[in-house]
Amino acid sequence: MPVTNKVTLLLRALIRTFTGPTTSTGLVKFLNSPSKYASTSAEYDIMLWDRSQDGPSHILKGHTDHIRTFELRNGFLFSGAADNTVRIWDLASGECVRVLNHTEYISILTFSPDDALLRAGCGGSGHVSIWDWGTGTPDTSRTTQLYTSFDGRMITSGLDGCVRVWEQDGTLLEAFTAHDAPMRGLVKVGRFVVTSGTTNGRIKLWDWDSKTYLTDLQESVGLIANVTTGYGRLVVSSWKGSRELHQIQIWRLDEIETFASRYRSDQ
């Protein structure tokens, strides 16, 4: 694909870029609509935003160390942090309704298929804690997994930059190296996949069926802190330079898929 065509298509996919001081934002999570979202601050607070308002609607205080992950379920926001806790927040009132204690810092939160169980994992040791989050009771009676792939199989990615696909019984099916740095996220876009590194700042596009690397979406964006999706959008949060500036980019997933299809057909 000619460079000019590639740039034109990717510019259509990139909706907006926000840049500000590092104290402004760490993680970003869409809430109940594209106009409402949560973000974190360097002071370990969570801010709830609505684009119709000039400032945050709520500031949620309670964590004592860096917040590393967000999840949203049934009107509740779940935050996992380096203080080894999960906090469950009622979005309507802004109140913390429950605190769950893990053994290590928390880097990922996921739910069982019926949403009844909350799983918290650490990217270092891989240790997982499981709770019935409605009651706060630990639950170890059911087999669970942290990540689910696109066909009911498990998919993991992490510190070694490798993506692995597993059967539900733990049988390893395939593996490939996606990055030469720890990975921050993996997002399905039709039959394509977007992967992101951390320290290498790269956002890569893959053909998932063949596990073929296609191209980078752009030049390295710096240190990638967070990747999330919602409402057809991909949000990449990163630091530039020596962390003097924080950057948030919002991409349209449908335009990324259009670009990937065109790029693949031209190869």
Image (cartoon, grey):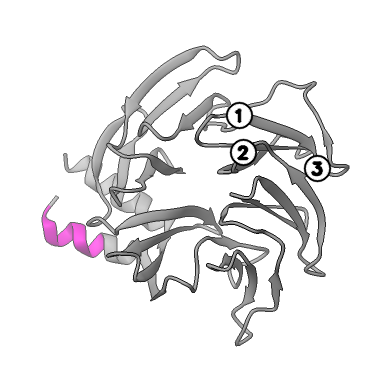
Asked if the residue under mark 3 is in contact with the one under mark 1, i.e. CB atoms within 8 Å, the reply is no
Up the image or down, 144 lies above or below 61; here it is: above
Number of residues whose C-alpha sits closer than 10 Å to that of mark 1, classed few (under 14), some (14–19) or many (20 or more)? few
Amino acid carrying mark 2 in the image: Glu
Asked if the residue under mark 2 is in contact with the one under mark 1, i.e. CB atoms within 8 Å, the reply is yes
Number of residues whose C-alpha sits closer than 10 Å to that of mark 2, classed few (under 14), some (14–19) or many (20 or more)? many
* Residue tagged 1: 127
The residue lying at 52 percent from left, 12 percent from top is 171
* Residue tagged 2: 104
Q: CA distance from mark 1 to mark 3?
A: 18 Å
Q: Which residues are magenta?
A: 2-9
Q: CA distance from mark 1 to mark 2?
A: 8 Å
Amino acid carrying mark 3 in the image: Trp
Q: Residue furthest right?
A: 135
- Horizontal arrangement in the rendering, residue 71 relative to residue 134 (left or right): left
Which numbered disc, 1 or 2, marks the residue closer to the eye? 2
Q: What x and y, as percent, mark residue 44? A: 60, 64
Q: Which secondary structure, mark 3?
A: loop
* Residue tagged 3: 133
- Horizontal arrangement in the rendering, residue 102 relative to residue 188 (left or right): right
Query: Quick one: label 1 or label 3, which is nearer the N terminus?
Result: 1
The residue lying at 28 percent from left, 66 percent from top is 11
